[in-house]
Amino acid sequence: MSLRHRAGFTLLEVIAGMALIMFVIGGVYGIANGAISLGTSMNVARIAETRLTNFSSVWRDYFENLPPGIRFTGGADKVARGGRGSLLIEGGDIPFAWTPAVRLAEAVEFSVVRGANRDFDLVVRHLKRPERPISPDDYKVLAQLPLLQGLKSISWGYFDATEKKWFNSWDPKKRPTPPLFMRMKFQFTEDPREHEFVFWIANDLAVVGDPAAAPPAADPANVNPPPQGN
C-alpha cells in the first residue's frame, strides 16, 4: 500500500510571498500618493495664480478709472524689516466692495500688517468719516479684508511724471496730483519668485500721446532703472 503525499507551501515560501505582496502594495500606494500630491500641488498653484491674476485685474481697473480730484497718500513707514508702508486714497469709487454698506466708504486704505506667522498681510480697509471728526484725517473703519497673505516682503514705488523719478512715498501736500504710475513688488514666504506689477493711475494731468504717459522701463535685470528718490 502506497502513501500519497499532499503538496503545499513551506513556511519560508509563505513569508516570501507575503513580503512580495506587501512590496507590490507599497509600490502602488506610493505611486498613487505621489499622483495625489502632485495633483494637489498643481491645484494649489493654479488657485494662487488665479488669485494673483484677479488681484492685478481689480487693481488695474480701479487705478485706470480714478477720477480727477482724489487725494493720494503713499506712506513710507516701515511695518518691519521687509514690509513697507500703506496707501490711502480719498475719493473716487471704492474697490473690493462686497456689500452695499462698504460702498458708502469715503476712503480706502491698503495697509501692510503682521500676519499670524510673523510674515506680512496686505489688507484693504474701507473708511468713513465719523459724525464729529476730530481732524481732517479722522476716519473710522467700516470693514477690513485681507488681499494677500503670507508675504515675505512687499514694497511700493510711485513715479512722478514731472521729475521722471520713482519715490518710496507720496505726500499730497508736496505733490497734490496722483503719481502717473504705482509699482508693487512682493514675494510670498513659500514662493521664491518675486512678483512685480506696475499700474497706470488716471489723473487730470495725463495727456493722450504724451511721452510721459508711457510706463517707465521695469526691467527685472535692473538695466538702467529709473533713479530712486525719497
Image: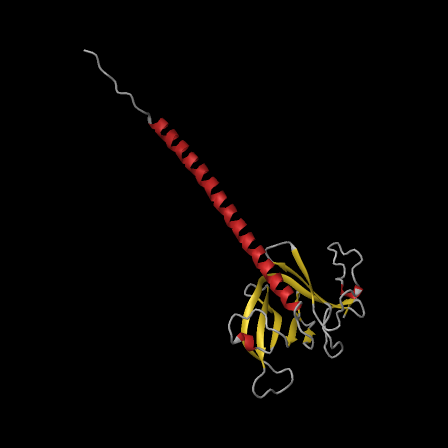
Q: Position of residue 163 (x, y in %)?
A: 81, 69
Quadrant placement of the C terminus: bottom right
Q: Residue 22 is drawn in which quadrant?
A: top left
Task: Look at the image and tell me whether residue 110 can be seen.
Answer: yes
Quadrant placement of the N terminus: top left
Q: Position of residue 77 (x, y in %)?
A: 68, 72
- Vertical comparison of 191 with 100: above or below: above
Task: Look at the image and tell me whether residue 79 can be seen.
Answer: no
| Viewer-closest of 209 and 20 | 209
149 to the left or right of 162? left
Q: Position of residue 47 (x, y in %)?
A: 54, 55
| Viewer-closest of 85 and 173 | 173
Q: Position of residue 68 (x, y in %)?
A: 69, 75
Q: Residue 103 is drawn in which quadrant?
A: bottom right
Name which residue lies at 64% across and 82% down.
Answer: 137
Name which residue lies at 65% across and 69% down.
Answer: 65
